[in-house]
Amino acid sequence: PISWYAKPEAWPILLPIINAWKNIGYFSVVYLAAIVGIDEEYYEAALSGGARKWKQMTSITLPLLMPVMVIMTLLQ
């Protein structure tokens, strides 16, 4: 058996993976709350303008999530 805790060369790989796994639940709740907080009128206006899901995501969702992304990055 491999003793992962005793080998120092394994830690540069293990620590980012463990940290990402630890924070993925918290981040998913924060981003989901931010997405739910976006007003539906933006999506309705884009849909009436002919925008499909990809265009709605790139033109509405991502720009409105950018402040949350910046804050979450600064808090890291």
Image (tube, helix red, strand yellow):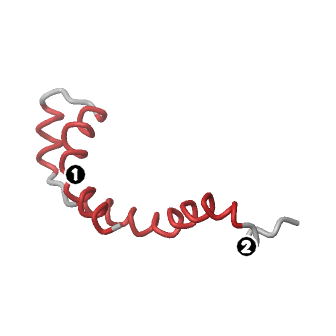
Q: Position of residue 65 (x, y in %)?
A: 23, 52
Res 67 quadrant in image: bottom left
Q: Which quadrant is the N terminus positioned in?
A: bottom right
**Residue neighbourhood size for the residue with mark 1, other residues' Cα within 10 Å, grouped as few (<14), some (14–19), many (≥20):** few
Q: Which residue is mark 1?
A: 66
Give amino acid for label 2: Tyr
Residue occupying the point 13% across, 32% down? 48
Q: Earlier in the sequence, mark 2 or mark 1?
A: 2
Q: Which residue is identified by label 2?
A: 5
Number of callouts? 2
- Residue furthest to the top: 50
What is the three-letter code of the residue carrying label 1? Answer: Met
Q: Residue at x 53, y 64 (%)?
A: 21
Give the answer, above or below, for where 62 lies relative to 30: above
Disc 2: CA contacts within 10 A as few (<14), some (14-19) or many (>=20)? few
Question: In what element is the residue under mark 2?
Answer: loop
Residue 24 in the image, given as x and y percentages of width and height? 46, 63
> 4 or 66, which is in the foreground?
4
Image quadrant where residue 29 sits: bottom left
